[in-house]
Image (cartoon, helix red, strand yellow):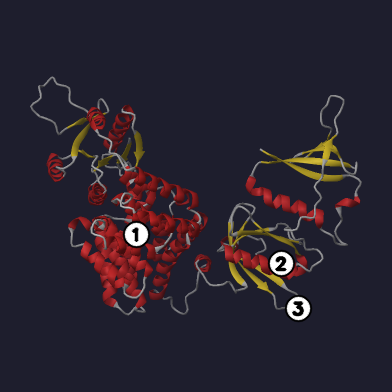
């Protein structure tokens, strides 16, 4: 039996009470041999697919409604569970004010409702909604004991084998091919045929399948699925819920064929006629549709702008959240408001920073939208130092292109309506911010790469990403590349390093593609103390750079094509002393050198064993060795001019 628990342990008010309740929930669940599954409210509220499935599919859900601003959203998700036929739901509530507790209990009359208080002396939670006429010496029932009894009485709902198998296959496909959207999309198209069997269909199955289609951005398939189910009387019920109305309107708006926006708006507004559908996502969707209409009108449709602000504001008032807040702030700026003198904008900024701060420091955040919100709010406040910190974090998270498009779209809107005066002097922070805008815009470009100038990031030996531009000059008599760094420290006279490099074709040793990140390549050059580990905005940019370097330098005498393996594989045997120990020739900083002999030629060789402690640094080391072994030039001393050859043997540790 799976038991999903939703309880907030971030908001500080009465936090110890909820922590105590959570511990008793764990004990009760474990005591009956059930599987405890913690569901984080912010991820459930955001609509993260795995979190939604955990909550909706659990045999029993225990929901703590102690946080007032979370009640409406949790009530919505509880309703979705019921629409799937999941009846095992238990409401718990921290009884701080008896009047509020009674009101909530009456509104939750259809559920098991347990209100509790924490006993500070015993650190246990006792129930407050029991018979007050109990004898004075009767021990007060605890939350732990009551939950344990309820869970023991739960009759685990049986699910049809075909539905179980479909959902299991769906989860397996997402886990296996989640990183390959095109492959996953093909698998989902095949699975769609199975939904023609009425024994497979259920509200749970349809919702999970719609979320999977949304994740691969197959909006047309989402729209067609809802249309198909609406045309069959026995399946119409699966798409008439609030959450399905949201997903259908969302898909229509994203598909954006002729008339889709109007249908999406009509569907959303009709759903909002029911009070229970006034959840943040639906309200935000109305704001998004009006915002898209405003943009597509070439920013002339001011009524749509006002409506977009209205719906995002309403969502933010229902429950302060990052998505509604950042869009509301952006549209207010577009509407002519200034961050410095608008109280609403300042309050939104404070709330958003607080919401993000509760999740940890910027560098520790793992959710793209958290970082992107921080990025956008920093731009709105014109705090470009913080914006460039957030931009680097966004790059490291390697988000899908449509994530970046959404973020960059907002920034471009801001810039369109917040024009700088012609005599404005751009600070170095603004210049680096503009670099990141160039980087992300190139990353989201779906057209063929034709430019010979690209924004790049160079990973310095100190593990610092240096914003740079690379210019590839293929038209001059002597082809060359130029790399220009944008160094913040250099502009403040705190760095004396060279930040402008020019390498002619004859100075390029080689180029290779990094195997651990499809955006990264290595450039090996002469006359420079360090080679370059370069990160590009996209895989396509990296490939274009790689092809141009091969074209530029492949006919040069000193260039080595690392894709061609000309090294002979050496079969060797170690030399041993009288005590059967390998003969050591010497020890260095990076390894130990042993005496050996080439088994084919019987030539004495030396084997240096180098431990590979950091797998990320292995590729350039191997390629440097390969470069030195294959370089043939009159000015380069060749290894085979010596009677003892040195080969490298790497130990994985």
15 horizontally vs 218: left or right: left
Q: Which residue is mark 2?
A: 550
Q: Which numbered disc, 3 or 2, marks the residue closer to the eye? A: 2
Q: CA distance from mark 3 to mark 2?
A: 17 Å
Q: Secondary structure at mark 3?
A: loop
Inspect this view and state whether residue 262 appears: yes
Q: Which residue is mark 1?
A: 323
Front residue (pair 276, 405): 276
Q: Position of residue 562 (x, y in %)?
A: 73, 58
Q: Which residue is mark 3?
A: 477
Q: Is residue 527 above or below residue 134?
A: below
Q: Position of residue 227 (x, y in %)?
A: 30, 64
Q: Position of residue 28 (x, y in %)?
A: 29, 30
Q: Is residue 474 above or below residue 581?
A: below
Q: For label 2, count other residues whose C-alpha is less than 10 Å away and answer few (under 14), some (14-19) or many (20+).
A: some
63 horizontally vs 101: left or right: right
Determine contact: label 3, label 2, CB under 8 Å. no
Nearer-N-terminus badge (1/3): 1
Q: CA distance from mark 1 to mark 2?
A: 45 Å
């Amino acid at each position: 039996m799976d038991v999903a628990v939703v309880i907030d342990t971030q908001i500080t008010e009465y936090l110890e009470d909820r922590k105590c309740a959570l511990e008793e929930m764990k004990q009760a669940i474990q005591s009956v041999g059930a599987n405890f599954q913690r569901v984080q409210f912010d991820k459930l509220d955001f609509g993260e697919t795995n979190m939604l499935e955990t909550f909706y599919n659990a045999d029993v859900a225990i929901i703590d409604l102690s946080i007032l601003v979370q009640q409406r959203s949790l009530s919505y998700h509880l309703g979705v569970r019921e629409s799937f036929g999941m009846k095992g739901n238990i409401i718990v509530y921290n009884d701080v004010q008896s009047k509020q507790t009674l009101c909530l209990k009456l509104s939750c009359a259809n559920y098991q409702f347990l209100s509790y208080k924490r006993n500070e002396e015993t650190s246990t939670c006792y129930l407050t909604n029991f018979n007050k006429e109990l004898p004075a010496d009767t021990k007060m029932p605890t939350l732990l004991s009551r939950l344990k009894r309820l869970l023991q009485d739960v009759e685990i709902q049986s699910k049809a084998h075909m539905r179980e198998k479909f959902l299991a296959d769906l989860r397996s496909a997402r886990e296996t091919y989640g990183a390959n959207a095109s492959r996953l999309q093909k698998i989902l198209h095949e699975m769609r045929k199975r939904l023609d069997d009425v024994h497979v269909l259920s509200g749970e199955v349809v919702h999970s399948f719609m979320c999977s289609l949304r994740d691969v951005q197959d909006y047309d398939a989402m729209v067609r699925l809802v249309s198909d189910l609406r045309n069959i009387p026995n399946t119409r019920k699966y798409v008439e819920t609030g959450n399905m109305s949201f997903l259908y309107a969302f898909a229509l708006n994203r598909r954006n064929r002729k008339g889709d926006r109007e249908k999406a708006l009509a569907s959303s507004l009709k759903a909002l006629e029911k009070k229970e559908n006034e959840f943040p996502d639906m309200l935000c969707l109305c704001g998004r549709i009006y915002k898209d209409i405003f943009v597509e009108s070439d920013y002339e449709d001011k009524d749509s702008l006002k409506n977009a602000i209205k719906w995002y504001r309403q969502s933010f008032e229902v429950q302060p959240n990052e998505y509604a807040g950042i869009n509301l702030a952006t549209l207010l700026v577009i509407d002519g408001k200034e961050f410095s003198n608008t109280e609403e904008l300042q309050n939104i900024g404070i709330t958003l920073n607080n919401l993000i701060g509760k999740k940890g420091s910027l560098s520790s955040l793992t959710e793209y939208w958290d970082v992107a919100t921080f990025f956008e709010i920093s731009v709105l406040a014109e705090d470009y130092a913080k914006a460039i910190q957030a931009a680097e974090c966004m790059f490291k998270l390697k988000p899908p292109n449509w994530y970046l498009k959404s973020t960059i779209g907002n920034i471009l809107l801001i810039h369109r309506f917040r024009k700088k005066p012609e005599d404005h002097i751009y600070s170095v922070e603004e210049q680096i911010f503009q670099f990141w805008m160039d980087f992300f815009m190139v990353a989201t470009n779906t057209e063929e790469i034709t430019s010979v100038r690209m924004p790049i990031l160079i990973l310095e030996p100190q593990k610092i990403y240096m914003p740079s531009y690379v210019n590839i000059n293929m038209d001059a008599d002597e082809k060359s590349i130029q790399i220009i760094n944008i160094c913040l420290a250099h502009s403040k006279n705190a760095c004396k390093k060279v930040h402008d490099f020019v390498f002619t074709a004859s100075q390029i040793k080689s180029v290779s593609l990094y195997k651990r990140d499809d955006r990264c390549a290595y450039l090996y050059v002469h006359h420079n103390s360090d080679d370059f580990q370069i990160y590009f905005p996209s895989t396509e940019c990296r490939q274009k750079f790689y092809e141009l370097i091969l074209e530029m330098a492949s006919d040069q005498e000193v260039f080595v094509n690392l894709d061609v393996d000309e090294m002979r594989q050496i079969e060797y045997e170690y030399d041993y002393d009288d005590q059967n120990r390998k003969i050591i020739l010497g020890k260095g900083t990076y390894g130990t050198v042993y005496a050996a002999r080439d088994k084919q030629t019987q030539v004495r060789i030396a084997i240096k064993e180098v431990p590979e402690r950091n797998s990320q640094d292995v590729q350039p080391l191997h390629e440097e060795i390969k470069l030195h072994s294959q370089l043939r030039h009159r000015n380069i001393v060749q290894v085979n001019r010596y009677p003892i050859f040195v080969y490298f043997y790497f130990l994985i540790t």
